[in-house]
Amino acid sequence: MASSKQPLTPSSAIRHRRRRRCLLGTLAALLALAVVLLVLFLTVLRVRDPTIRLVSTELTGVAPRFALLPAPSLRLNVTLILTVSVHNPNLASFAYADGGHADLSYRGAHVGDAQIGPGAVPSRGDAEARLALTLQADRFLAAGDARQLAEDMEGGALPLDATTRVPGTVVLFGLFHRRAVAYSECRFAFAVAEMRVQSQECTGGTKL
């Protein structure tokens, strides 16, 4: 029985070779693209930790409250405006909506908190955020005895710790979006008489 296969004509053989070359070229281009994306992910897209610095504090209000129950007591709430500077060393910008939160503690006792409003930090740029921090003065005594607080006040500075957590989105070239959480921990001395930050030490990072 004669074979049904027809011998390739010169023109069909040329077309076959062209299709094979086109297929090989496409595969090579896809492989090169995969390598480029891998290198991009390992270098450019690698998220580096932002640096956070407490710039200034401002006393804006004092609100005393007198409670009769369960026992007569005087509670004092103090509102501080904190200005925080954030430097973003990454090529990607960081945008955050409502949901950020900051906690303040004195010698292990929680004494204040603040909500962080929406904002954005540009790529390889800086941005400032203002936080309205409510200090509950009566909680300072919960950290220990009144003598310790008096000694710190007499020394002119209160040792405080601030922890900040800001969920947001990392945006690269306006195309790639990835959820991330920026966080920071700051230990600083707050000068009571001058109402300013005397010294500070902050560390920060980003979790994807």
Image (cartoon, helix red, strand yellow):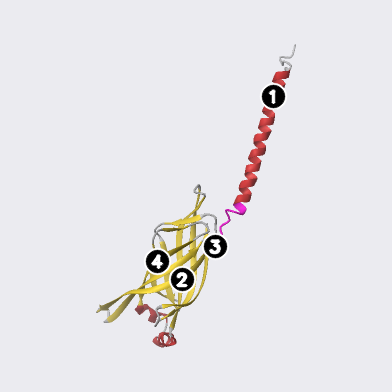
Q: Is residue 79 left or right of residue 52?
A: left
Residue at the image point whose x is 69% and y is 24% from the top? 16
Q: Which residue is mark 2?
A: 54
Task: Check disc 3: other Cα within 10 Å, few if <14, some if 14-19, many if 20+.
Answer: some
Q: Secondary structure at mark 4?
A: strand
Badge 1 marks a residue whose secondary structure is: helix
Residue numbers of the magenta segment: 41-50
Residue 47: give x, y in percent of width and height: 56, 57
Mark 3 or 4 closer to N-term? 3
- In the displayed image of the protein, which residue is found farthest to the left? 68
Disc 3 vs disc 4: which is toward the camera?
Answer: 4
Mark 3 vs mark 2: in front: 2
Q: Compared with residue 14, is residue 2 higher up or lower down, i.e. above or below?
A: above
* Distance from the alpha carbon under mark 4 to that under mark 1: 67 Å
* Up-down relation of residue 14 to residue 3 (above or below): below
| Residue wearing tag 1 | 16
On the image, numbered disc 4 is attached to which residue? 130
Which residue carries the number 3 mark? 49
User: In this orientation, does residue 153 appear?
Assistant: yes
The part of the image, by quadrant, that contains residue 75 is: bottom left
Mark 4 is on which residue type?
Arg
Residue 57: give x, y in percent of width and height: 40, 73
Decide: is 49 above or below 18: below
How far, Cα to Cα, is label 2 from label 4? Answer: 10 Å
Give the spatial CA distance, label 1 vs label 3. Answer: 53 Å
Of 37 and 208, nearer the camera is 37
Which of the two labelled residues, at mark 2 and mark 4, occupies the earlier sequence position? 2
First in sequence: mark 1 or mark 3? 1
Q: Nearer the viewer, residue 137 or 11?
A: 11
Which residue does the image show at 29% across and 80% down from the upper left?
A: 74
Task: Looking at the image, tell me whether mark 4 or mark 1 is earlier in sequence order.
Answer: 1
